[in-house]
Amino acid sequence: MDLTRRSFAFASAACLLAPRAMAAAPLDPALTSPYRALASEPFPVPAIDLKRLKSEFLRRQVDDPTREPAGTIVVDPARHFLYLVLPGGKAMRYGVGVGRSGFAWSGEARVNSKQAWPDWYPPKEMLERQPHLARAMRKLRSGLGMPGGAGNPLGARALYLWQDNRDTLFRIHGTVEPWTIGTNASSGCIRMINQDVMDLYERVEPGARVVVLGAPGGSEATARGGDRLPPLHQLVRDPDALARRGLW
């Protein structure tokens, strides 16, 4: 009987200690510190609630898996990563959100320009799908849109993607919904945490090549087979299809 009581006591103690043993290890401050609030911008950039993000989507330098030249941006939609290829066989890896079903794409483009706190001009098709957005629209210099700012869906920075001297209407941009990083939630644009797109913005110049992979599965950022996403060059030739997708 005494042995049974001792065994029960030991088992109870083990159960009490188990949650502490299973607790997640604290994240490296080098990974978390870039996501603090930023007060030096024209508009507030709040701190990111890292509890709502998987740690794999935090910015970090990694061995380059893309085999692309330095300066190239490679987006792997299947894994929700964006790589900026660096010299010396390295890459900066960021977590991203990508196009939801029916809005994804693949192909190559160039960064035509970049803008801080960009205005947003959603096409009428998007306003028809989401009529509540119309209340935030204003007459701006380029038409009906939403001024850049803390509540703008394009976030703190945007890189504008063109192909063959045409605006693809797709952007790499920040977001007011950082919890969607690592998901398929956009209308085709590549969305990033504001602190991450600000970092990318400083590293990339107009003319940079952008490659969006089109094959889910396979080895990291190198897959070329499997089910392809719609190629960008076909979308650029179909302005109506691009307009239906929108810029968010």
Image: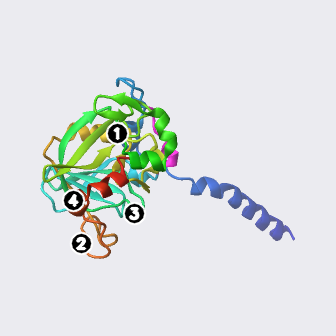
Q: Provide the secondary structure element on which disc 4 rests.
A: loop
Left or right side of 50 for 56: left
Q: Is residue 26 visible?
A: no
Residue 70 x, y percent position in the rendering: 13, 52
Residue 46 lies, with reference to residue 237, above or below; the image says above
Residue 202 x, y percent position in the rendering: 22, 36
Q: Provide the secondary structure element on which disc 2 rests.
A: loop
Can you tell which quarter of the image residue 38 is in? top left
Asked if labels 2 and 1 touch by Cβ distance under 8 angstroms, the answer is: no
The residue range painted magenta reads 46-53
Nearer to us in this view, 72 or 16? 72
Residue that numbered label 4 is attached to: 237
Among numbered discs 1 and 3, the one appearing first in the sequence: 3
Residue that numbered label 1 is attached to: 121
Q: Is residue 52 one of those drawn in magenta?
A: yes
Among numbered discs 4 and 2, the one appearing first in the sequence: 2
Number of the front mark, 1 or 3: 1
Within 10 Å of the Cα at label 2, are there few (<14), some (14-19), or many (20+) other Cα atoms?
Answer: some
Among numbered discs 4 and 3, the one appearing first in the sequence: 3
Q: Amino acid at mark 3?
A: Gly
Within 10 Å of the Cα at label 3, are there few (<14), some (14-19), or many (20+) other Cα atoms?
Answer: few
Residue 138 x, y percent position in the rendering: 40, 29
Residue that numbered label 2 is attached to: 224
Residue that numbered label 3 is attached to: 102
Q: Amino acid at mark 1?
A: Tyr
> Residue at coordinates 51% horizontally, 48% vertically from top-left?
52
Number of the front mark, 3 or 2: 3
Q: Provide the secondary structure element on which disc 1 rests.
A: loop
